Amino acid sequence: MLPVKDAENLILNHVQPLTETEPVSLDAVAGRVLATPVSSSLDYPHDDNSAMDGYAARSRDLTEASPEQPVSLDIVEEIPAGVPPRHPLKTKQAARIFTGGVLPIGADTIIIQEETQREGDQVKVFSSPTPGQFVRKKGSFYQAQQPLLPSGLTVGAPELAILAAMQCREISVYCRPRVSIFSSGNELITPDQTLQRGQLVDSNQYALTELVKAQGAIPIPLGIIPDERDALKSAIAQAISSSDFVISTGGVSVGDYDYIEQILKELGGEIHINSVAIKPGKPLTFAAFPNCYYFGLPGNPVSALVTFWRFVSPALKKLSGQTNNLQPNFVKAKTEQKLQGNGKRETYLWGQLKIIAGEYKFHLAGGSHSSGNLINLAQTNALAVIPVGETVISAQETVAVMPIE
């Protein structure tokens, strides 16, 4: 059995990002991974503009202004946001300006309206401003043609806003990985079939499809494949030839009907992992083909999800072209209940991570922590980790916790 960290490193070292790219429009770029660095022909801000409501003025006209001796300036125009100024400022002149308004030629400072008093076409100024006060200088946030967003970045709401503001209308992104998903087992049925004794409804297909979709990849659900050698070999051959990534559940243990590892070898796959020292999720298979990566996950629902979160998700991020934050993040939290492991494998227990009084707290999900107990996974947002060699972490002690995205 490989230690968990060794398995993670081995997987990430083998998986290489896709190289195919495509241009997409601004409306379609959310959730996609940038294939090339993005730049813009625009400065940001586009012009010198006001950060406050007040008056644009020349600071040299106001060096003597004070509450006791205010200086009066002639107001020559009003400049709302979006309206270009019409008059350069001359000596002892000012322009009424609003947040976002473009500074007129000659102005180098903004006096906020709280430090002024308007009297008809004049304004009294009660303070001496410094040059550049409350002015957002052209290009101070970004200068044209400089790197704006790096490659390997997943576009979220902030990045989408930046691309829109900088008029980046067509963006090069990596093509989304195609991920085939199937479940193996004679005991499995679909949710719409009548359940007979001894049968189980295939829940893994639904959970994994959603997890793959949430990472921006294209899930290809292949359904349930019976534990028959020919059927499995045909399904796997089809999956590896038509997708970049294959995820199967079941058939990777040591039972009489667990054919998958043998089939992978026959199809030319190089098996790098077939067992990991993790609980739940020990029978994990990772294989590489020339143009595809294969993950064989355990069939138990909890095992399938834990191994996806711990191993498959980082690999899929890297395959998608992401370059940052590939490995899971761990935080230190106080556990509210006693946590138990077997000491022989790294144990993952599911529950909820919360911040209470500025401190991370982990609340263990109630009920059995069996790998077959799907029910108490509801509302899970984190996994507490008991290291190898430890069997108990007492309540109120610190534990490493992996938040689930």
Image (tube, rainbow, N blue to C red):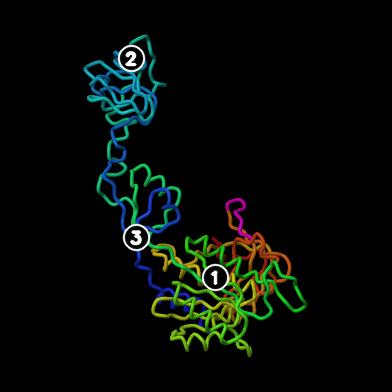
Report if the CB atoms under discs 2 and 3 are less than 8 Å apart.
Answer: no
Q: Which residue is mark 3?
A: 35
Q: CA distance from mark 2 to mark 3?
A: 57 Å
Specify few, some or many for label 3: CA neighbours under 10 Å numbering under 14, 14-19, or 20 or more: many
Would you say the residues marked 2 and 1 are in contact, meaning their CB atoms lie under 8 Å apart?
no
**Which of labels 1 and 3 is toward the front?**
3
Q: Which residue corresponds to the image point at 42% horizontal and 65% vertical from the top-left?
A: 320
Q: Quadrant of residue 132?
A: top left
Query: What's the residue type where badge 2 is placed?
Result: Pro
Asked if 45 appears above or below 286 in the picture, the reply is above
Sequence-first tag of 1 and 3: 3
Q: Secondary structure at mark 2?
A: loop
Q: Secondary structure at mark 1?
A: helix
- Measured as percent of width and height from the top left, residue 62 is found at 27, 20
Residue 171 x/y as whole percent: 34, 53
Closer to the chain start, of discs 2 and 1, is 2
Q: Residues within 10 Å of mark 2 (few under 14, many from 20)?
A: some
Residue nearer the viewer, 153 or 110: 153
Q: Nearer the viewer, mark 2 or mark 1?
A: 1
Q: Which SS does the magenta portion mostly show?
A: strand
Which quadrant of the structure image shows residue 49? top left
Residue name at image x 31 percent, y 40 percent: 44
Residue range (magenta): 352-358
Task: Please indicate whether residue 64 sits to the left or right of residue 119 in the image.
Answer: left
Going by the picture, which residue comes out furthest to the bottom? 256
- Three-letter amino acid code at the position of disc 1: Phe
SS for dot 3: loop
Residue occupied by mark 2: 70
Work out whether mark 2 precedes mark 3 in sequence or the reverse, and give the earlier one. 3
What residue is shown with label 1?
A: 308
Marks 1/3 in contact by CB < 8 Å: the verdict is no
What residue do we see at 43% from left, 80% from top? Answer: 288
